[in-house]
Image: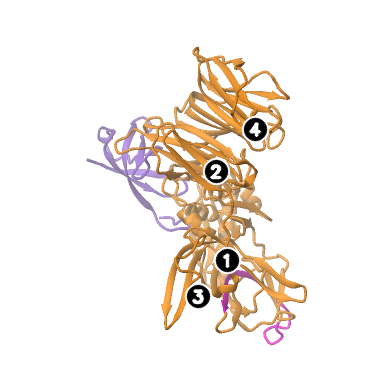
Amino acid sequence: MACAAKGARVAVVYVDAAGTGIKLRESTDNGATYASEVAVTTAAASVNDLAVAYKNSGGDLAIAWAAGTSIAIIKRVSGSFGSASTASPGFSSLNGIAMAYGFDWDMVVTGVEATTLKPSLWTIVYGDGNDVPVNTWDTLLAQQQAESDAQVTYKAPSIVFTDTYRIAFVESDAFTGGATRVYRTWLHPALLYAGGAFALRTPVPVNYGGAEGLAVAADTGGSGYVYETAPDAVYRASQSQALMTLTANVLGVEIDERGGSTSGHIDLDNSGGAYAGPPAPIAIGNLVAVSWGYRTASGLQASRMQDLWIAGYERRRSGGVSVLRLHVEGAWEALRRNVQRAQVVHTSDSYLTVLIRAFSRAGLQLSSSGVSSRATSVTPKFTVATGTSGFEAVRQALAFLADRIRPRPLASAQITEPLASAASDYTFGTDHPLRDVRLLSDPPAVSEAQAFGSGAFGEAIDYASAAAGIGVRVQQRDVTSATGSAAAATAAAHLRQRALDAPAGRIIVPPHSGLELLDAVELADAFISASAIKRRVAAIRWRYDRGKAVYEQEIELGVM
Amino acid sequence: MLEEEDGDLDVRSGVLKAFDGASYTATVQLTGSLAQWLRTVPVNRGIASGEMTAGRKVAVAVFDASNPADAVVVAVWA
């Protein structure tokens, strides 16, 4: 049995005693009364589970079911049911199906995979002309899998589309010490439901062990609540953002952004006791949006930096002063905490896809801009092993590329190849004063990179450094490369990565509100050089201290 | 030994799930992996096939953290 609601409509679907006849009863008065049973269709085999979802409040809906080794869907459009469409994309058996109408008919299916006999949780889309062409089954995508003899069962899926796709399912572990438990997962709101395998957020355990799981539902319109229900439990979470503006009470901010980490703190004036507690929504894990800017002739102008989350807080009370210090961190730390529950094997994905999936499983969106051709064209043998963090997986993949990643606002990040020939994004030293400058000319730490492929060898050499005996040689396993040129390309990418590590000094300036890591900047200072010097932003330390009247950026520079 | 971005060879413990004497490869459940196993992991030819009994503990040397197949079973015990 399954039900759905939209506006005043409520649909209840079920199967008859024979197990194949699919029936519908519908209410158009919020469930107060129901019309007579409608015989929708007859399934080809006994139905194991079924789902129903409305497309609109006019009554267009679809019913999906799992029977035998197939899933099927039948749509009602303008009051009339069409014919069913069936798909058998590789099931050995099925035990659950759930469906929501997001942009298409978006489904979650549980069962056992054909051939491998792996217990699995999949997503699949039946197109409605948005992400997938109308009336077309998209690819079956594994999102969770276990070995055939692991004594693991995935079942009781449920899905709702609200701000994004939110899914609950049961993992039942029959091995010694195993448990039956509900897990939650979701998708970054900017990502497509049909985006790819192993793209859902790494499932989060829920303290509910009912074998039939939790059914998820939501009030419409983006307000009200998201609900998880079972016969013996109801959970709800507000869909409304709980916002608090901290600006007036900020005493100081210090944020350190660099390649691979983001951390810092925000001090709030608690002299009036306003932050005792602290009050909601100040809580560990909640988002803090920090924007840097100026009062200008055009009013307040600011740019929001990458997302920050509260990692902890500290109550400071000394000499009559009361301060609440929020310790914050960013996307890199979210990746570090995102440890895989199950192994993810990439067999035909590019490095870029591998990286996009790693971010997606941490709830983050990775987009690309000016990414290297290697990132999109090379499909490595790449496995994210159980217990590996998203951060480790990203570092392992980046070791084979010349690209770098910078976190951005709205739980996103961007990958780009920092080219030596890139144009400058901004010039310091003319209109924007340089308060302090330390320019370094350090050689790269690595002068030779060697890649050992599958029966192939490749190398890349910085001859100037090597001749001077300055850099070291690094060696890298690269089983993906089967030719000398492929291995050489890996070595060249790795050499470029290490070259980018070379420090090139630092400057202190009044904040450039929109500056980001990896930006190319020029320094104009005739005392240092007659011509502008171009450097890349390797790290930014933002500082604001109201008591000491400090408002500045310390920018660590890297080579172009 | 070749070094990856993050450093050194990784030695992991696990439980032998299956052994294929013809290809001299093993299926291993690494400690910490509750639901998935490594398959076709090469086995040290110095280990007698008779010692490769399912359920025994094994040590796996992993050369490439992003490719567990690039590994070898180096010891079996228990």
Residue type marked 2: Val
Residue on which the image places disc 4: A8
Residue type marked 1: Ala
Which badge, 2 or 3, comes first in the chain's sequence?
2
The magenta stretch spans which residues?
Answer: A525-545
**Which mark identifies residue A226?**
2
Residue on which the image places disc 1: A499
Which x, y percent locates residue A466? Answer: 55, 68
Residue on which the image places disc 3: A272
Asked if badges 2 and 3 are on one and the same chain, I answer yes
Out of A529 and A228, give the one closest to the viewer.
Answer: A228
Which x, y percent locates residue A285? Answer: 49, 58
Q: Which chain is orange?
A: A
- Image height of A441 relative to A515, above or below: below
Looking at this view, name the residue that lies furthest to the front.
A32
- Image height of A114 relative to A439, above or below: above
Q: Marks 2 and 1: which is nearer the front?
A: 2
Chain for numbered disc 3 = A
Chain B on-screen colour: purple
The residue carrying pointer 2 sits among few (fewer than 14), some (14 to 19) or many (20 or more) residues within 10 Å by Cα, namely many
Chain for numbered disc 4 = A
Which x, y percent locates residue A71? Answer: 56, 23
Under tag 1, what secondary structure? helix
Which x, y percent locates residue B12? Answer: 34, 48
Looking at this view, name the residue that lies furthest to the left.
B78
The residue under the point 72% across, 78% down is A532
Which badge, 2 or 1, comes first in the chain's sequence?
2
